[in-house]
Amino acid sequence: MKVKILAFGDMHDRTDLLNMAIGIENPDIILSCGDNDVYEDMGKPYIGVYGNHETQIAEAIMNGSVKFRNVKLLKPGEIIKLKDIKISGFPGNHAKEKKEWHHYTKSEAEKALKKMSPSQGINIFITHEAPLNMADWNVDHTKHFGCPHIRRMVDKIRPRLALSGHIHSPQIRVNGYTTAINVGKLALGQYFIISMDTEGFLIQGAEQRQLPVEMGV
């Protein structure tokens, strides 16, 4: 079965753009890499993680105290199965000290890593920060902005697809078994359409799309 995925991040409350993308693409699944600020049901399965620019409504959605019919934000390392695809994720951004609710520390990342295994059969892994040296170039392609903790998770579980946001720099890198995609910034109209075949979980296509919005929004 072929599954059409709309992957985005860094919406920064521009739900109008998400609605526009959904209307154009009619995806089977919506996957979010965080920094949305606003959440609402979109009439499609909507799975993601929170980022570092969010209100605490995102944490409440993740913990289940605020509920939407179709929206699911993943807890660290949580796995769900949707249309035969196993999806997992790790939310937030790394900090040496946990000064904000969305921060995770090195020890928290290492604790989560110990529970992860390739035998879990995760097909898609969603994070806000990119894995180090995997689709983590800045906009000018002069510096890598990936996180080593996320890279260790990706290397251990070996997902077919690793999705991230945060750096507002859309790009793809194939790293052995895993295709890493930084989905860009939806607030600038950027998102990806990915086609995955659930027989073998092969990626049959991954294409960046651009909505007609002015740069600098």
Image (cartoon, rainbow, N blue to C red):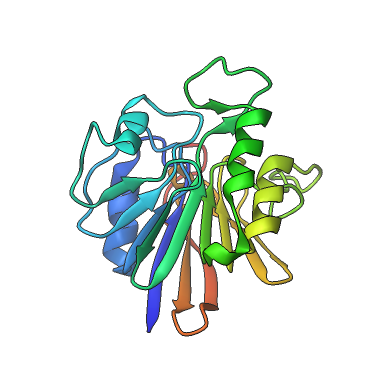
The foreground one among 185 and 64 is: 64
Residue at figure coordinates x 51%, y 43% from the top left? 215
Q: On the image, which quarter does residue 81 sit in? A: bottom left
On screen, residue 200 versus residue 135, left or right, reads left
Residue 38: tell me if it is visible. Answer: no
User: Is residue 178 shown left or right of residue 50?
Assistant: right
Identify the residue at horizontal 73%, vertical 48% (top origin): 137
Which residue is most to the right? 142
On screen, 166 above or below 107?
Answer: below
Picture coordinates of residue 75, whole percent (x, y):
43, 41
Residue at the top extreme? 99
Q: Is residue 159 left or right of residue 70?
A: right
- Residue 23, image x, y percentages: 26, 62
Q: In which quarter of the image is residue 166?
A: top right
In the visual, does 2 lie left or right of 169? left
Q: Residue at x 64, y 24 (%)?
A: 95
**The N terminus appears in which quarter of the rendering?**
bottom left
